[in-house]
Image (tube, rainbow, N blue to C red):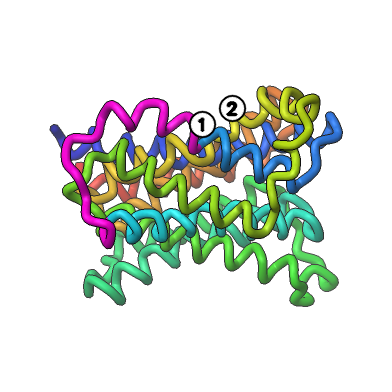
Amino acid sequence: MSKGYYAWMVFLGGCSYGILSTIVKVAYEHGISVAEVCGAQGRFGMLLLWSVAWRWKKATLGWRRTMGLILSGSVIGCTTIFYYKSLETLPASLAIIFLFQFVWIGCGLEWIFFHRRPDRQKIVALGLLLIGSLFATGVQLEQSSLVFTPGMLWGFLAALTYSLLLLISGTVGRDVSPIFKSALMSVGASGMIFIFFPPMFLTDVSTLIALCPYGILLGAFGIALPPLFFSLGIPHVGTGLGSILTASELPVAILLACFVLGEQLVFGQWLGIGLILGGILLGNSQRR
């Protein structure tokens, strides 16, 4: 397949993550707690993947490789936990700025582990993405917001684990079927979430029924689709370019907040979205 196809896979993986924030906000408005949101995301995502993967498996993996893929999936759970923890104390616009730092962390990890130094074109693309993120979220850096808080630490940790997910997707289990690899990783993701947020909702039938619509959507776009898209695309485009392509997360999150939640967008935010999309195109133009 063409490399453009693999780039689109990574781009769609980022878009999938961008859908989550709108679903979570709607769930909060209906009285769903953070623990229930995280738990439902992990459980339903794992069920969705395994409903398909059990038919897809072609060869038996050794227990070491199986456990390696399961443990690799724990970074997905960590990203979910850290980001939702940052949202407890930070405004959404500021929390997503810290999460968005994965765009340069991913390029840094590629430089450290694979000795692929970002070229001038990629550095300019990163600059456009970071500047665009400030405009797109409408964040205003006041003196009080410059004081480091635990919420900022959670947000930065989410960016770090998200970058690790991109790195792992391109290096671990490259010869394993992407759907089966994603299913194994979903076990690690769910396990990590359940350690922090025990799935108490499983003992309450009415709560479980109320969580189903949100859990299915969050599981699909937060646990099932992103690792599948990343496993397909990142081995072919690399972690650095993958980080740039997954910047699609932010424009999707903002546009959905506008059209679904009714939030108003000012000119600066539209400008920021344009800069982010321009940065993605610039970062991918040489490969195209």
Residue lying at 75% horizontally and 72% vertically, measured from the top left:
150
Residue lying at 50% horizontally and 41% vertically, measured from the top left:
223
Task: For marks 2 and 1, give the CA distance.
Answer: 6 Å
The image shows residue 180 at horizontal and vertical percentages of: 30, 39
The image shows residue 240 at horizontal and vertical percentages of: 32, 59
| Amino acid type of the residue tagged 1 in the rendering | Ala
Q: Are marks 2 and 1 in contact (CB under 8 Å)?
A: yes
Which quadrant of the figure contains the N terminus? top left
Residue lying at 85% horizontally and 71% vertically, measured from the top left:
144
Secondary element at image label 1: helix
Q: Is residue 111 magenta?
A: no
For disc 2, the marked residue is 216
Judged from this view, the residue extending furthest toward the left is 1
Can residue 224 be seen by looking at this rendering?
Answer: yes
| Amino acid type of the residue tagged 2 in the rendering | Ile
Depth order, front residue of 250/54: 54
Depth order, front residue of 265/248: 248
For disc 1, the marked residue is 220
Can residue 287 be seen by looking at this rendering?
Answer: no
Residues rendered magenta in the picture: 46-65
Up-down relation of residue 250 to residue 89 (above or below) = above
Task: Kindly identify which numbered label has been placed on residue 41.
Answer: none
The image shows residue 92 at horizontal and vertical percentages of: 74, 50
Quadrant housing residue 271: top right
Up-down relation of residue 271 to residue 129 (above or below) = above
Label 1 neighbour load within 10 Å: few <14, some 14-19, many 20+: many
Residue lying at 18% horizontally and 39% vertically, measured from the top left:
3
Quadrant housing residue 119: bottom left
Which quadrant of the figure contains the C terminus? top left
